[in-house]
């Protein structure tokens, strides 16, 4: 059964069950019969075959006679069917008038109640659907790939991990306030916190990929089958793992000779130094703890895409739509918490980027200033203006005049858009602009960083509505020029 098999559960009785199984097997599909309607328990070892099946077929026959009703037996079959439904592997088939289990009853079954054993359009449809599941070859959700969004505690755990990282980051930032007159070590701390930042970005990118397929479904827009087909074949866990930061690097920056710990030891009380040791000790173990738990979110998203794809394969458009809407509701708080954590981290890093003195404090009270780009005049917050001016200078070093012009135009568009955004979101957009420009002009092949920056700008452009439209167009042009 190298190419996969399907697992059959039946409820009720039907003299056509064996005939149906034979017809499916004749089409080239391996069939394992796990639980018949007249059996109290599955045959020994059959549940293992369910755990590795490409699809689970639930066949409903006719209700048993009153003296043969066994609620325990039918309940066991129903539990197996609900388990298959949660994984997106259930294919319901009606051969008689017995009732489907509650949740699987939401699905429209393959209707063979009038089938007599010959050719039938619904039989042809069933065979096509099962061949698609077998060809997919990644239907083994129970044994090999963990859980999907049908298990809400996974989402709650992701939120908890983000919350714990935010707390550690805040505490590290507060310790960094002791070093604000020490440019070298505040720069080290900013670099250490970048490892948390790229982890947020990796999680945010995976969420954005999934949510981009989700967002319009609740408004009646047609489900993008191709998007779920692509997501079901990606490993978002691997994507987060490859894109996230290294806690080993944080530990080295803190503990090395001449590092952050030595700098804090010179200015902090014993209590604060102990606090620093605790905070950075937590960071040191996060590779196998906090960061690893966030990787699990990527696995959950991929499994959810496979579940939705399974519903779409069986033609269960309404059930898939409901599943997508529920996924959006469960993921939105996670998405928002990652965005807040990302924003808060940048605020901490920006604060640490100053060497506090009387002069700089006076400059910091100026909220806006004028900048000039290609003869145009813009008003922007000081920190945003600085980034945009640096970006324009960098854009001039692009390898072609066309790319230099496009990057300069993008800087203008982001400057205009920033006036319509809250200040913290405008700062994020300016940071992403600078990242895109640096990568485009340097020729560095860093797709994860590029994707994160592009997604950040597109997200800001969406919130800015009409003011963001030029940003979207220019990103498309620049992506073509650098590809």
Image (cartoon, rainbow, N blue to C red):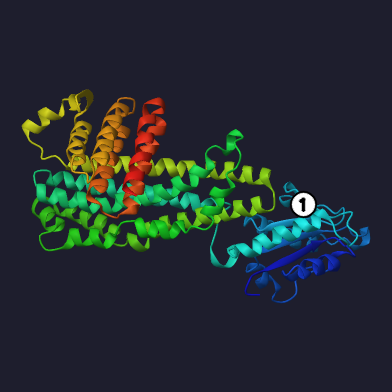
Residue 468's image quarter? top left
Residue at 46% from the left image edge and 54% from the top image edge:
297
Residue 473's image quarter? top left
Sort mark 1 into few (<14), some (14-19) or many (20+) by Cα contacts within 10 Å.
Answer: many
Q: Quadrant of the N terminus?
A: bottom right
Camera-side residue of 340 and 113: 113
Asked whether, in this view, residue 481 is left or right of residue 100, the answer is: left
Asked whether, in this view, residue 71 is left or right of residue 418, the answer is: right
Q: Where is residue 306 in the image (x, y as percent from the top left)?
A: 57, 55
Is any part of residue 439 visible from this angle?
A: yes
Q: Where is residue 260 in the image (x, y as percent from the top left)?
A: 15, 55
Seen in the picture, residue 263 relative to 352 is either above or below; the reply is: below
Q: Looking at this view, name the residue that lies furthest to the front.
A: 401
Q: Name the residue under label 1.
A: 109
Q: How many marks?
A: 1
Residue at 9% from the left image edge and 33% from the top image edge:
360
Q: Where is residue 336 in the image (x, y as percent from the top left)?
A: 42, 40
């Amino acid at each position: 059964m190298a190419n996969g098999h399907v697992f059959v559960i039946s409820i009720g009785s039907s003299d056509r069950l064996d005939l149906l199984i034979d017809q499916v097997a004749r089409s080239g599909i391996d069939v394992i019969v796990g639980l018949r309607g007249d059996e109290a328990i599955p045959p020994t070892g059959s549940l293992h075959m369910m755990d590795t099946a490409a699809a689970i077929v639930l066949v409903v026959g006719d209700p048993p006679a009153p003296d043969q009703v066994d609620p325990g037996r039918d309940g066991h079959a129903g539990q197996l069917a609900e388990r298959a439904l949660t994984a997106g592997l259930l294919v319901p088939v009606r051969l008689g008038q017995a009732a489907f289990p509650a949740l699987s009853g939401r699905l429209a079954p393959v209707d063979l109640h009038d089938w007599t054993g010959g050719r039938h359009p619904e039989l042809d449809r069933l065979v096509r659907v099962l061949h698609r599941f077998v060809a997919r070859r990644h239907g083994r959700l129970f044994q090999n790939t963990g859980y999907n969004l049908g298990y809400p505690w996974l989402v709650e755990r992701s939120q908890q991990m983000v919350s714990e990282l935010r707390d550690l980051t805040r505490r590290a930032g507060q310790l960094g306030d002791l070093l604000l007159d020490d440019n070298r070590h505040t720069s080290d701390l900013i670099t250490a916190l970048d490892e948390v930042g790229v982890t947020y970005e990796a999680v945010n990118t995976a969420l954005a990929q999934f949510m981009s397929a989700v967002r319009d479904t609740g408004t009646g827009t047609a489900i993008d089958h191709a998007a779920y087909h692509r997501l079901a074949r990606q490993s978002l866990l691997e994507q987060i793992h490859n894109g996230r930061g290294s806690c080993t690097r944080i530990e080295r920056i803190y503990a090395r000779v001449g590092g952050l710990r030595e700098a804090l030891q010179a200015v902090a009380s014993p209590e604060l130094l102990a606090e620093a040791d605790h905070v950075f000790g937590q960071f040191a173990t996060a590779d196998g703890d906090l960061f690893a738990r966030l990787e699990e979110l990527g696995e959950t998203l991929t499994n959810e895409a496979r579940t939705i794809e399974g519903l779409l394969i069986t033609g269960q458009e309404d059930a898939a739509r409901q599943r997508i809407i529920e996924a959006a509701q469960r993921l939105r708080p996670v998405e928002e918490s990652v965005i807040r954590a990302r924003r808060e981290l940048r605020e901490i890093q920006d604060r640490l980027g100053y060497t506090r003195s009387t002069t700089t404090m006076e400059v910091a009270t100026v909220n806006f200033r004028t900048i000039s780009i290609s003869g145009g005049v813009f008003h922007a917050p000081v920190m945003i203006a600085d980034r945009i001016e640096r970006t324009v200078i960098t854009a001039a070093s692009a390898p072609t005049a066309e790319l230099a012009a496009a990057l300069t135009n993008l800087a203008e568009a982001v400057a205009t858009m920033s006036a319509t955004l809250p200040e913290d979101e405008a700062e994020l957009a300016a940071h992403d602009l600078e990242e895109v420009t640096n990568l485009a002009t340097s020729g560095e092949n860093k797709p994860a960083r590029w994707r994160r920056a592009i997604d950040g700008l597109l997200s800001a452009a969406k919130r800015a509505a009409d003011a963001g439209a030029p940003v979207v167009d220019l990103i498309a042009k620049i992506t073509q020029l650098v590809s």
